[in-house]
């Protein structure tokens, strides 16, 4: 509209006449947006104010006409459209209400001139004035016409619409205001009744306009009240309006009440009665204002205004002064006291639930007005609130202020009531102190709303007289309420004014002091009672700044007798000292609050008598009074952190804490822990804090508890004497020490008997109290101490912990370590603000003493130095301390303990600060040399921490220092290592090094190079250092030489070129010129110059050089030793020298008739053979190879002899155990049997195995490359000796397995003894296993037969199972045993135990009638080792860990079984019996166990294709393994990678087993799947199978069917791969049938669907029977579908040949065991499958159980057959049959 007006402009004028009415009307629309739009457009059209008025006057007739038309409208006439009646009604109401508002505003504009007259309007011409006059006259006339026509709009006031009623009130107000004459006298009554009776209006939306109309009508027509019944029409409705809280319009109506009172004609009402009823009903309406603070304020504001108006205008209703006074007195009595004050007291009563108080105030309130709302106490409890009580009090005070201004005497009426109420409460000595809460709160409100405004009447008229009257009560009765009232009054008005009011005249300072001393002090300091606390508050409140010191001195001397105090300890009066303690506590609290609020306290509280009393108490002996500790806490202060007020001198304060410290030390000296007593010397630190002597431990404990009470109440006071050098740290340290003792006592108390517990119970109680006290102290307190105190305290506690480790031995070491580590962490947390302070404490902790360190000493100048003597006397203590250091490293980090120089803060961030120099390379060296400690070791604890740290932070300096220290130590000791040197050094070998420094050095270097922390540069640097130390002038440093081979076994790899990289000629040239190459050549030349090994008598330094040379030529092994090869490239010079060295030993050994059996010689020779074969084999001739093989066979067979002897000893021990019942004795014999294993032959055999493995690998390689006869490695030449060696290796393999099998047959512990013996030589057994895996079937067969011939109690198969399921497994042996068990020639005999022989029966049927489901070959019985895992799968395995050894063994058993089952021919009877065995005996829980490893729910993504899903690692491994197992029909790939066992590897094995079971045992898995009742589980399994298994399975099935040869003209097969369908067509003579076999997407979980698409010459019954037969075959087949189809075809053939079908399964060939019906019934002459007949009794019994004859009523089977099969079932059946069939 605004845009339209702007666009049209003046062209709008011709159209204004029809527009002006709706335009004006729209400006009052109830929709805000509409009204605002209309107003803006109107102002735009007529910008000037006078223009708008001119327009309205010009078109006034049109506007009035439009409004009149609107008022004539009805809902039905509003619209021609079909609109709902309720919408029409709403539209009509909006039109009427808007019209009224438009009319009212129009009248105001025209008549009242709401548009102000402007200057230009004053200059308009006379004609314009006349025009306006005419327009106004016309407007008034039109308005009067409307008023008359619509009967004063009174009917609209009765409308149901609040909007119409509100608008009608507005238009009536406008008429009364602007056209008062419109109401004639004849209609006055009806109009008055309607308007003045409008208080019945209940809608708050109408009340604003209603009040305006009522007030204006009463003011304009005061005589209208005389025309009606005031009581009935006005007052009764008004009372109801007020009682109902103005029906919700409190904020509008309550302010209007005083205006209403002003307009009420005095003659129309009876003054006193009217006001009493008015306030009574007004008061009754307060309950609707309880819940809104705004409504409460409006209510109390209305009460205040109306009441004060009533008092001020009393003359309107009363004649004469007496009548006025009486009227005012009545209002005060009835309203102020009877209603408001009564309510205020009632609020207090309801809030504090005191019945006696409620009754007292009810009785004291003499009110003739009956309260309207006599709610129950419970209702009041809900309604009253703190805001309501406060607002009510404010209202009363404002009214009292108004009364005081009006008439002082009127105020006395309330004051006397207030005084009486107070006295009633003060005299109730047994009442709760909360009863006086109302009086206190009222005083506070008086202060806030009257006193602070400068008004004097509260003190003079109200409080003063009340205090004067109640003071007598205060003196005579022990009333806390009266005293508290005085205290609050003093705080408001000041002490001088209160005392002045009490004695009624003003006092000077001297008289004031005299009155204070004579009256106040005795009053406030009398004996302890209920009001003592309040009296002390009063005493402190009455202290005056002008005479404080005199008053305080009077108080102290009144309580403490100077003549008695200090003479004898403990002579201070108990009652007075208790009162004094309370007084000081209150004074301290008042002072603290004043300071906290920003004020300043100038009071000097210190007094000499307080010092004397404190000293007297602290020097006294038990028993103590309760007041003693209370008094000391009061004078000391410090109960809270901001309490800094001093009541005693500093010297006294220090003396008190010294006595407390002395008491704590006395308690510590009485401890049963040696370290606690020992720590006391630390606490003294040169000062004489000697212990106090006590007559008994009871007195000592009481004194300790007293000291703790004082400390607890004054703890923060310690900060005031923080500068006392040793006192504060000593006290705090004592608290920590006793707290630690508490921890130890708590741990040990469970181990004490009743007597010991009784001895420590009292001590433990105090320790627990100390623990609770210490726990409350925050770390902020400790950190707020001075740096000297924190440093001293930390030092004491650190030294205490060290003494616990080195002196204390009361607890087991593990507990000590845990506690001490926790305590050190607490020390760092509490006392260290930054890294520097923490490192200082760590330095203190790690400082040397008599016990620590054992190997490396910290040196401030050199950094570290080696300890001259390493006494074993302190080794255990040193190890315990290292365990604590290691525990600390694990808790707070390596960076903070060892590499402190790189730690910026306690968080471990790196820094470059030169001032922090705490790097502790010596500590790392000490820990590495200690090697093992309680709960950890260097290998498993420290080195991983070191590695993790240096990977994140570049710490070459730290590592260099550690290596340097260890190298120096190793050089000093100069001991050899005992490493094999042939292999990459392993941590297991490092364990065998005895010399601590060398062991530490080798383990550290191994970690650094294995973890790629150090590289070639570091290796070169270290190699150069070693070369420099190797020679001293021309002499060899023997110590360096001895350790050099061990270090070189680590360095050789980074120093050299890998063998596979030797093709790079540049690198080879560079290597040939390197110092490492030159040194190696030099060492080789020197070693070649030595005499042959066979001539050695002692080694001297020759052995060390030999070892050094061997360490330079390491061997590299692939995983599980499946392949061996040289580790590095060597130059031709090195190769020539190495071969020369080998040839020299070989030639001399061949030429010599005597073999030097010196162990050193044999060991070096075996190693030399290995490295020569590895690096120089190309130079070997036939003699060389002959020497190698002969020596290898000799060394291996020596070990075979030893191991066979061990096996025989084990067999004898177990065999003889039957004569001995002592298992311990047998286990001891077994231990002795395995202890005879000599490690030296095993080491030689290990080297021989390596040589033989290298030879075998080279033979295979050379056989492919060179076929000529000149090849020295031609296999024919060495076949015999190779077989002999392999035979020996396999005998070793079977020997250890047989020994464990024999031991296992005795008990599990015996098996563990034997199996554990292998763990000492893992490398040897790994080599044995690798050769066993590579052995030929022929060699295995010979080995098996030799073990069988041996004649031990267990054979070769048992030995293999013992290795697979070993209790102490070695993975290579497990894998090798698995391979041998799952391959020929062992596999065939590895599973079946024996076969049940046939029993006598009807042999003509060729079937055992007692076992009709088995063929003539009998039942399958698996070996016990595997059958119990398959048949009796333990349910507990489901609850075991996913990598538990029992679970692994079960999986291995199933893997073996499935491998064997898969190897059997598909149609063989053996396979059928095995499959039937699975169906009957195997526990299907194995499938549930498999799926525990495959979290299928993680890969369930609806709508996703397989390739789109990113599978979790475990699911991915399982899926891949399942697919691979189906494709390869093998699980060997899973078994090979199973060890070390992990979650993902177990998932892979589980997936493989699941896939292979789907392939080999589809019907078995399908049966398990169909039993799953959890839909989400079955859906997940089906989804996994469908995605990863079914595609491969379906492809295999269809391929096999397509390749199958059915070779019959009557039968044909066609495959539809795209539809996964097979069509089988069978035709015979003139009959034929087509069956379609459809494989489901989730095959084989879901059954195959079989459908008949064509039949010719076959009855429907036979067709259905054949269809069911095919379904039965394909669903029950645990194998390929091609086999099922072949069997089904054979079934057809037999049927056409005339063979009778089984009447039970309707098939000729049995669907499970493929047998023919041979068991004949003598009654019906039918032949049955024995398996069907065998199961029939169970089916029949099931039918009989439900009350039917079932199968037996159809089949006339001779009952004799059932009796023969299952007599027990027959007996039950017979009983049921007699019940059913008479």
Image (cartoon, rainbow, N blue to C red):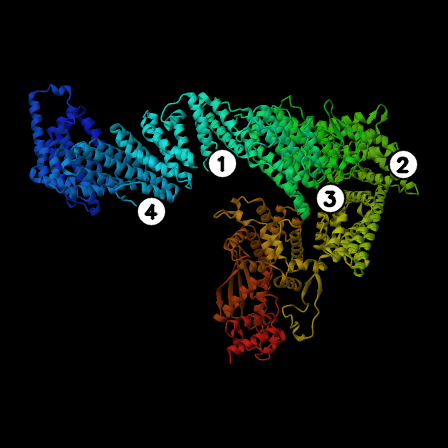
Classify residue 647 as left or right of residue 1184.
left
Tell me residue 255's x, y (percent). Answer: 24, 34
Q: Mark 1 touching mark 2, by CB under 8 A?
A: no
Q: Number of callouts in the render?
A: 4
**Secondary structure under the numbered disc 4 in the rendered image:** loop
**Secondary structure under the numbered disc 2 in the rendered image:** loop
* Furthest-right residue in this view: 1153
Q: Mark 2: few, some, or many residues within 10 Å (few <14, many ≥20)?
A: few
Residue visible at 63% across and 75% down in the picture: 1764
Classify residue 1073 as left or right of residue 1578.
right
The mark nearer the N terminus, 1 or 2, is: 1
Q: Distance between the residues labelled 1 and 2?
A: 100 Å
**Secondary structure under the numbered disc 3 in the rendered image:** helix
The mark nearer the N terminus, 3 or 2, is: 2
Q: How far apart are marks 3 and 1 (CA)?
A: 93 Å
Nearer to us of marks 3 and 4 is: 4
Q: Mark 3 points at which residue?
A: 1121
- Residue in the foreground of this view, choosing between 803 and 1162: 803
Tell me residue 787's x, y (percent). Answer: 61, 24
Q: Distance between the residues labelled 3 and 2?
A: 34 Å
Q: Mark 1 points at which residue?
A: 528
Q: Mark 3 touching mark 1, by CB under 8 A?
A: no
Q: Mark 2 points at which residue?
A: 1098
- Quarter holding the N terminus is top left
Quarter of the figure with residue 210: top left
Q: Distance between the residues labelled 2 and 4?
A: 114 Å
Tell me residue 862's x, y (percent). Answer: 74, 23
Q: Any mark on residue 376, and which?
A: 4
Nearer to us of marks 1 and 2 is: 1
């Amino acid at each position: 509209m605004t845009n339209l007006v702007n666009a049209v402009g003046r062209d709008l004028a011709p159209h204004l006449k029809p527009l002006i009415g709706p335009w004006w009307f729209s400006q009052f629309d109830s929709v805000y947006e509409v009204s605002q739009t209309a107003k803006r457009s109107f102002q735009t059209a007529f910008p000037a104010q006078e223009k708008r008025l001119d327009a309205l006057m010009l078109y006034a007739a049109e506007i009035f006409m439009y409004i009149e038309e609107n008022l004539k409208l009805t809902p039905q006439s509003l619209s021609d459209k079909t609109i709902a009646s309720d919408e029409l009604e709403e539209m009509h109401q909006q039109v009427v209400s808007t019209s009224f508002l438009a009319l009212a505003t129009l009248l105001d504009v025209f008549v009242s001139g709401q548009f102000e007259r402007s200057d230009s309007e004053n200059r308009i011409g006379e004609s314009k004035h006349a025009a306006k006059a005419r327009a106004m006259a016309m407007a008034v006339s039109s308005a009067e016409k409307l008023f008359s026509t619509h009967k004063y709009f009174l009917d609209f006031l009765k409308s149901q619409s609040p909007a119409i009623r509100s608008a009608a009130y507005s238009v009536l107000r406008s008429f009364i205001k602007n056209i008062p004459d419109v109401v004639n006298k004849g209609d006055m009554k009806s109009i008055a009744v309607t308007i003045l009776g409008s208080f019945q209006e209940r809608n708050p939306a109408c009340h604003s306009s209603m009040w305006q109309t009522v007030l204006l009508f009463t003011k304009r027509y005061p005589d209208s009240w005389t025309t009606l019944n005031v009581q009935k029409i006005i007052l009764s409705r008004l009372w109801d309006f007020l009682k109902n809280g103005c029906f919700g319009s409190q904020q509008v109506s309550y302010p209007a009440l005083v205006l209403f009172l002003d307009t009420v004609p005095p003659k129309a009402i009876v003054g006193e009665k009217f006001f009493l009823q008015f306030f009574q009903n007004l008061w009754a309406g307060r309950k609707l204002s309880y819940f809104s603070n705004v409504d409460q304020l409006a209510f109390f504001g209305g009460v205040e205004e109306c009441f004060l108006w009533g008092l001020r205008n009393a003359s309107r209703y009363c004649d004469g002064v007496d009548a006025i006074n009486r009227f005012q007195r009545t209002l005060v009595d009835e309203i102020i006291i009877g209603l408001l004050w009564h309510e205020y007291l009632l609020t207090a009563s309801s809030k504090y639930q005191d019945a006696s108080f409620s009754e007292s105030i009810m009785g004291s309130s003499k009110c003739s007005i009956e309260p309207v709302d006599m709610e129950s106490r419970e209702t009041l409890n809900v309604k009253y609130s703190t805001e309501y009580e406060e607002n009510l009090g404010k209202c009363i005070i404002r009214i009292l202020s108004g009364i005081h201004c009006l008439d002082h005497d009127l105020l006395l009426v309330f004051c006397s009531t207030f005084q009486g109420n107070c006295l009633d409460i003060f005299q109730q000595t047994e009442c709760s102190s909360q009863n006086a809460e109302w009086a206190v709160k009222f005083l506070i409100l008086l202060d806030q709303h009257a006193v602070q405004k400068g008004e004097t009447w509260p003190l003079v008229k109200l409080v003063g007289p009340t205090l004067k009257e109640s003071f007598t009560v205060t003196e005579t009765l022990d009333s806390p309420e009266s005293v508290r009232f005085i205290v609050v009054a003093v705080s408001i008005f000041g002490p001088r004014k209160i005392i002045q009011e009490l004695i009624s005249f003003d006092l000077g300072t001297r008289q004031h002091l005299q009155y204070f001393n004579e009256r106040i002090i005795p009053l406030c300091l009398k004996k302890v009672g209920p009001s003592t606390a309040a009296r002390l508050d009063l005493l402190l409140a009455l202290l005056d700044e002008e005479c404080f010191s005199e008053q305080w001195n009077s108080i102290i001397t009144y309580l403490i007798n100077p003549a008695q105090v200090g003479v004898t300890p403990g002579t201070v009066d108990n009652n007075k000292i208790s009162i004094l303690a309370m007084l000081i506590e209150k004074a301290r609290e008042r002072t603290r609050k004043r300071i906290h609020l920003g004020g300043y306290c100038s009071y000097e509280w210190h007094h000499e008598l307080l010092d004397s009393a404190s000293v007297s108490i602290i020097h006294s002996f038990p028993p103590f009074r309760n007041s003693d500790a209370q008094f000391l806490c009061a004078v000391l202060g410090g109960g809270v952190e901001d309490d800094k007020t001093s009541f005693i001198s500093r010297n006294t304060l220090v003396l008190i804490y010294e006595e407390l410290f002395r008491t704590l030390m006395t308690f510590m000296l009485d401890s049963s822990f040696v370290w606690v007593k020992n720590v006391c010397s630390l606490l003294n630190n040169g000062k004489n804090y000697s212990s106090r002597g006590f007559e008994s431990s009871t007195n000592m404990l009481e004194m300790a508890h007293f000291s703790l009470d004082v400390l607890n109440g004054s703890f923060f006071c310690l900060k005031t004497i923080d500068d006392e050098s040793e006192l504060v740290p000593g006290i705090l340290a004592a608290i920590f020490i006793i707290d630690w003792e508490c921890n130890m006592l708590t741990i040990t108390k469970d181990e004490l008997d009743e007597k010991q517990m009784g001895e420590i119970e009292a001590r433990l109680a105090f320790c627990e109290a100390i623990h609770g006290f210490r726990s409350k102290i925050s770390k902020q307190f400790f950190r707020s101490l001075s740096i000297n105190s924190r440093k001293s305290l930390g030092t004491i506690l650190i030294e205490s912990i060290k003494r616990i480790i080195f002196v204390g031995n009361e607890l087991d070491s593990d507990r000590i370590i845990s506690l001490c580590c926790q305590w050190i962490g607490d020390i760092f947390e509490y006392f260290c603000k930054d890294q520097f302070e923490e490192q200082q404490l760590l330095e203190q902790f790690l400082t040397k003493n008599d016990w620590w360190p054992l190997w490396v000493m910290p040196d401030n100048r050199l950094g570290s130095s080696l300890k001259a003597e390493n006494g074993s006397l302190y080794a255990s203590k040193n190890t315990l301390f290292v365990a604590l250091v290691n525990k600390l490293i694990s808790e707070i980090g390596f960076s903070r303990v060892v590499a402190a120089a790189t730690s910026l803060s306690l968080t471990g961030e790196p820094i470059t600060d030169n001032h922090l120099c705490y790097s502790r390379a010596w500590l790392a060296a000490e820990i590495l040399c200690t090697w093992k400690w309680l709960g950890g070791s260097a290998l498993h604890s420290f080195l991983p921490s070191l590695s993790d740290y240096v990977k994140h932070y570049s710490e070459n300096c730290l590592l260099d220092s550690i290596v340097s220290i260890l190298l120096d130590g190793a050089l000093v000791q100069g001991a050899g290592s005992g490493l094999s040197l042939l292999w990459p050094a392993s941590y297991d070998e490092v364990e065998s090094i005895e010399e601590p420094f060398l062991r530490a050095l080798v383990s550290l270097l191994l970690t650094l190079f294995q973890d790629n922390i150090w590289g070639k540069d570091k290796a070169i640097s270290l190699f150069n250092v070693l070369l420099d130390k190797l020679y001293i002038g021309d002499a060899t440093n023997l110590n360096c030489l001895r350790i050099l081979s061990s270090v070189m076994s680590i360095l050789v790899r980074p120093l050299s070129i890998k063998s596979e990289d030797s093709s790079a000629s540049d690198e080879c040239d560079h290597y040939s010129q390197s110092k490492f190459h030159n040194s190696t050549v030099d060492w080789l030349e020197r070693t070649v110059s030595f005499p042959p090994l066979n001539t050695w008598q002692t080694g001297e330094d020759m052995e060390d050089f030999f070892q050094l040379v061997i360490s330079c030529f390491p061997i590299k092994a692939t995983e599980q030793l499946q392949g061996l090869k040289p580790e590095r490239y060597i130059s031709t010079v090195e190769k020539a020298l190495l071969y020369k060295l080998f040839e020299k030993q070989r030639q001399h050994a061949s030429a010599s008739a005597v073999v030097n059996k010196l162990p050193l010689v044999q060991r070096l020779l075996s190693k030399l053979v290995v490295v020569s074969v590895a690096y120089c084999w190309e130079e070997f001739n036939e003699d060389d190879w002959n020497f190698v093989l002969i020596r290898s066979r000799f060394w291996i067979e020596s070990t075979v002899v030893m191991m066979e002897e061990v096996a025989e000893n084990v067999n004898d021990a177990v065999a003889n155990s039957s004569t001995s019942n002592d298992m311990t004795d047998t286990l001891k014999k077994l231990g002795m049997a395995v202890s005879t294993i000599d490690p030296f032959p095993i080491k030689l055999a290990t080297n021989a195995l390596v040589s033989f493995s290298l030879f075998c690998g080279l033979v295979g390689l050379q056989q492919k490359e060179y076929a000529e006869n000149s090849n020295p490695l031609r296999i024919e030449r060495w076949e015999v000796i190779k077989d002999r060696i392999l035979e020996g290796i396999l005998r070793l393999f079977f020997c250890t397995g047989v020994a464990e099998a024999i031991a296992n047959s005795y008990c599990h512990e015996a098996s563990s003894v034997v199996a554990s013996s292998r763990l000492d030589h893992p490398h040897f057994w790994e080599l044995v296993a690798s050769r066993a895996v590579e052995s030929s079937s022929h060699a295995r067969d010979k080995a098996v037969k030799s073990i069988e011939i041996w004649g031990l109690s267990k054979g070769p198969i048992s030995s293999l199972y013992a290795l697979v399921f070993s209790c102490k497994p070695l993975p290579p042996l497990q894998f090798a045993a698995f391979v041998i068990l799952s391959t020929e020639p062992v596999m065939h005999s590895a599973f079946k135990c024996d076969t049940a022989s046939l029993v006598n029966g009807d042999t003509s049927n060729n079937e055992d009638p007692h076992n009709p489901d088995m063929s003539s070959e009998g039942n399958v019985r698996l070996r016990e080792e595997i059958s119990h895992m398959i048949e009796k799968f333990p349910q507990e395995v489901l609850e075991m860990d996913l990598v538990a050894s029992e679970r692994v063994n079960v999986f291995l058993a199933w893997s073996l079984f499935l491998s064997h089952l898969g190897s059997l021919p598909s149609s063989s009877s053996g396979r059928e019996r095995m499959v039937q065995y699975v169906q009957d005996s195997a526990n299907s829980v194995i499938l549930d166990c498999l799926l525990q490893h495959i979290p299928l729910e993680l890969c369930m993504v609806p709508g996703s294709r397989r390739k789109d899903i990113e599978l979790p690692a475990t699911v991915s491994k399982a899926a891949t393994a399942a697919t691979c197992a189906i494709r390869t029909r093998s699980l060997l790939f899973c078994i090979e990678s199973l060890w070390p066992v992990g979650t993902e590897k177990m998932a892979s094995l589980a997936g493989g087993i699941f896939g292979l079971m789907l392939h080999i045992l589809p019907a078995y898995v399908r049966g398990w799947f169909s039993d799953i009742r959890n839909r989400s589980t079955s859906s997940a399994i089906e989804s996994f199978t469908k995605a990863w298994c079914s595609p491969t399975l379906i492809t295999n099935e269809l391929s096999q069917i397509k390749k199958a040869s059915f070779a019959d003209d009557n039968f044909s097969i066609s495959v539809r791969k795209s539809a996964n369908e097979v069509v089988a067509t069978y035709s015979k003579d003139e009959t034929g049938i087509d069956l379609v076999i459809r494989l489901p997407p989730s095959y084989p979980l879901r059954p195959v669907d079989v459908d008949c698409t064509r039949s010719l010459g076959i009855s429907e019954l036979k067709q259905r029977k054949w269809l069911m037969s095919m379904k039965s075959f394909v669903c029950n087949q645990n194998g390929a579908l091609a086999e099922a189809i072949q069997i089904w075809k054979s079934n057809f053939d037999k049927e056409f040949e005339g063979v009778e079908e089984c009447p039970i399964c309707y098939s000729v060939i049995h669907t499970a065991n493929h047998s023919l019906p041979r068991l004949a019934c003598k009654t019906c002459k039918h032949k049955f499958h024995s398996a069907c007949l065998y199961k029939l009794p169970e089916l029949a019994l099931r039918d009989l159980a439900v009350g039917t004859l079932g199968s037996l009523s159809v089949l006339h089977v001779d009952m004799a057959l059932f009796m023969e099969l299952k007599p027990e079932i027959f007996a039950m059946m017979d009983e049921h049959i007699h019940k059913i069939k008479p």
